Amino acid sequence: MPMKFSQKLPARLELIPGFTRALLEKVRQLGLKKEELFDIKLCLEEALINAVKHGCKLNPAHEVEVDVESAPGRLAITVKDKGEGFDFKNIPSPAKDEHLGKLSGRGIYLIRSHMDEVDFFDCGRGIKMVKFLKTGGELVQIKEEKLNDAVLCILEGEINLSNSPELRKIFDGIIKRNEKKVMVDFQGVSYIDSSGLATLIEMSQRIKKTGGSLRFCGLEQKIKNIFEVTKLNKLFEIYGSREEALKNF
């Protein structure tokens, strides 16, 4: 689904990490790969640092505007300030031997090397960075096993917008076979978003309608926190190990 939004950041360097994290959480919904998220985070922070330091002159009364827009296969991020601008056409390369010892001047170089398209506008007050995206995020690996009289689903990778349908297919097969005891091991799950949670809620409801029950186990702390923050730990039965989950059916 296309994404489009704008946010403003007061010109304070200490706000940049938190601002970047919040923006990346939104962008993550596109199901991007880790490498893409790394490049986007790096380039966004470099662009923000330049805008705050050089465009706004560290004046907290000024703001930097960030526009994000996605389309199939691409993500565009625009960073704008209201400073004096600069001569972006004549930037010395920090990769040259005579510049290697300099303490600054590498931000734009990094942006150009990690983004697919980089354009400056409004006399350098704005920069538009475009990343070409590969289809789909990190794949989710799903293994299905029998453990005594229960079905065990072992998940690895990310459960996100792009691969939640794959998880739904597995549950569809389990429900069609009228399995009553279903366990999901999250030990290898590195990320889950709201679409992944919605899939789990839907499947839990469907399994209960057939007279079955669902148990989760092996959640790493970050994943467990997602369930706790959303209060879904009250909806699902969550256990520390497979053995504990199996014992409590």
Image (cartoon, rainbow, N blue to C red):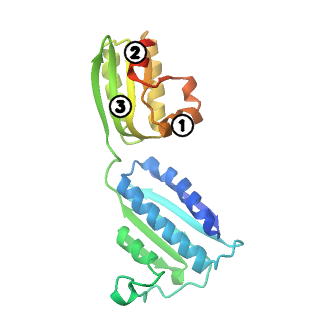
Judging depth in this view, the residue of 169 and 41 nearest the camera is 41
Which disc number belongs to residue 225? 1
Type of amino acid under label 3: Leu
| Mark 1, secondary structure of its residue | helix
Type of amino acid under label 1: Asn
Judging depth in this view, the residue of 60 and 1 nearest the camera is 60
Q: Name the residue at 57% across, 33% down.
A: 228
Label whose residue precedes the other's in the sequence (2 or 1): 1
Which disc number belongs to residue 246? 2
Q: Is residue 87 above or below residue 235?
A: below
* Picture quadrant of residue 192: top left
Q: Is residue 236 visible?
A: yes
- Residue under numbered circle 3: 167
Q: Nearer the viewer, mark 3 or mark 2?
A: 2
Judging depth in this view, the residue of 43 and 198 nearest the camera is 43
Q: Is residue 94 above or below residue 138?
A: below
Label 3 – label 2 distance at C-alpha:
21 Å
Label 1 – label 3 distance at C-alpha:
21 Å
Q: Nearer the viewer, mark 1 or mark 3?
A: 1
Instruction: Give the image location of residue 135, x and y in percent.
Output: 31, 50
Label whose residue precedes the other's in the sequence (3 or 2): 3
Q: Name the residue at 43% across, 78% down.
A: 106
Structural crowding at the residue carrying mark 2, measured as other residues with C-alpha within 10 Å and reported as few (<14), some (14–19) or many (≥20):
many
